[in-house]
Each structure stands twice: as C-alpha cells, then as structure tokens.
C-alpha cells in the first residue's frame, strides 16, 4: 500500500522559513508529477507548486519567488522550502503524488494527511 507522510510544519514568525517534506512509501510503484497544495480555514484547497518527474517546477503566483519545490527521486520525497513567510501563508499543507502501480498498471493521485503551517507573531 502506498502512503504519503508529510513533516516539517509548525509555528513561525512572519519573514521566517520552514521546509516541508513528503515521503512516499510502499512497494511496487513509480512516481510521476508531485505537488503541494494548501487549505486555509474557510477556504478551498489551492495549488501551491508542482514538479514534474523530470524536476521541472511551477508555482502559484502568491508564492513565486518565496517558495521552492524540489524532489529526491532516490528517496521518493518531495520538499517545499518556504521563505519570507506571511500570515496569509497559514494553512494546512498537503502533498500529492501521481503514482502508477506496477502490478496493475493503474495510475492515480495519492494524498498525504496534511501538516499545519502557522505564520504569526
């Protein structure tokens, strides 16, 4: 069974930094594109950043120039480096991975459980 586990969230002051990690575990799969989303209280979940299997990133406008998405394919892990954090970045952050199962050939999106990021003084 494939699982995604996020870590690295917490409380940080405005202007500070955090690094989120999302590790994919299990057997018999390959990982395609990966992404980070976030959901603030009372708001819809929104896309933050994506990265292709080849490592090409893309960012939502609110985080361009402040956040960096990266991946380590050997560790099946995606990262989100968040700098110059603002109170409006406060949200639960979720990772998503496009995964293909070897034994069935079925591809689908898998989600992590989320990690809370709070930016406050």
Image (cartoon, rainbow, N blue to C red):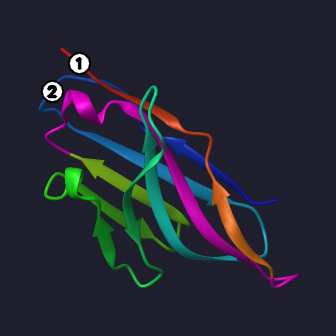
Name the residue rendered at 56%, 58% in the picture: 96
Name the residue rendered at 62%, 59% in the picture: 24
The mark that comes first in sequence, 1 or 2, is 2
Mark 1 touches mark 2? (CB < 8 Å): yes
Name the residue rendered at 16%, 32% in the picture: 16
Horizontal arrangement in the rendering, residue 67 relative to residue 36 (left or right): left
Q: Position of residue 70 (x, y in %)?
A: 35, 65
Residue 80's place in the image compared with 9, above or below, is: below
Horizontal arrangement in the rendering, residue 42 relative to residue 29 (left or right): left
> Crowding near pointer 1: few (<14 within 10 Å), some, many (20+)?
some
Q: Is residue 35 magenta?
A: no
Closer-to-camera residue (72/49): 49
Q: Position of residue 116 (x, y in %)?
A: 45, 30
What residue is pinned by disc 2? 14
What residue is pinned by disc 1? 120
The quadrant in which the N terminus is found is bottom right
Q: Position of residue 71 (x, y in %)?
A: 42, 67
> Crowding near pointer 2: few (<14 within 10 Å), some, many (20+)?
some
Residue bounds of the magenta highlight? 83-105
Q: Position of residue 20 (x, y in %)?
A: 40, 45
Q: Quadrant of residue 119?
A: top left
Residue 93's place in the image compared with 103, above or below, is: above
Residue 30's place in the image compared with 62, above or below, is: below
The circle on residue 55 is none
The quadrant in which the C terminus is found is top left
Q: Is residue 97 magenta?
A: yes
**Disc 1, SS:** loop
**CA distance separating discs 1 and 2:** 6 Å
Q: Quadrant of residue 85?
A: top left
Name the residue rendered at 43%, 43% in the picture: 38
**Disc 2, SS:** loop
């Amino acid at each position: 069974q494939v699982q995604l586990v996020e870590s690295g969230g917490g409380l940080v002051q405005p202007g500070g930094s955090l690094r989120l990690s999302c590790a994919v575990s299990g057997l018999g799969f390959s990982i395609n594109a990966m992404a980070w989303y976030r959901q603030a209280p009372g708001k819809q979940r929104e896309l933050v950043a994506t990265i292709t299997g080849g490592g090409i990133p893309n960012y939502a406008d609110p985080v361009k120039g402040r956040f960096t998405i990266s991946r380590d394919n050997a560790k099946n892990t995606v990262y989100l480096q968040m700098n110059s954090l603002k109170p409006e970045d406060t949200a639960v952050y979720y990772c998503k991975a496009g995964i293909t199962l070897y034994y069935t050939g079925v591809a689908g999106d898998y989600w992590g459980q989320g990690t809370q990021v709070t930016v406050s003084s």
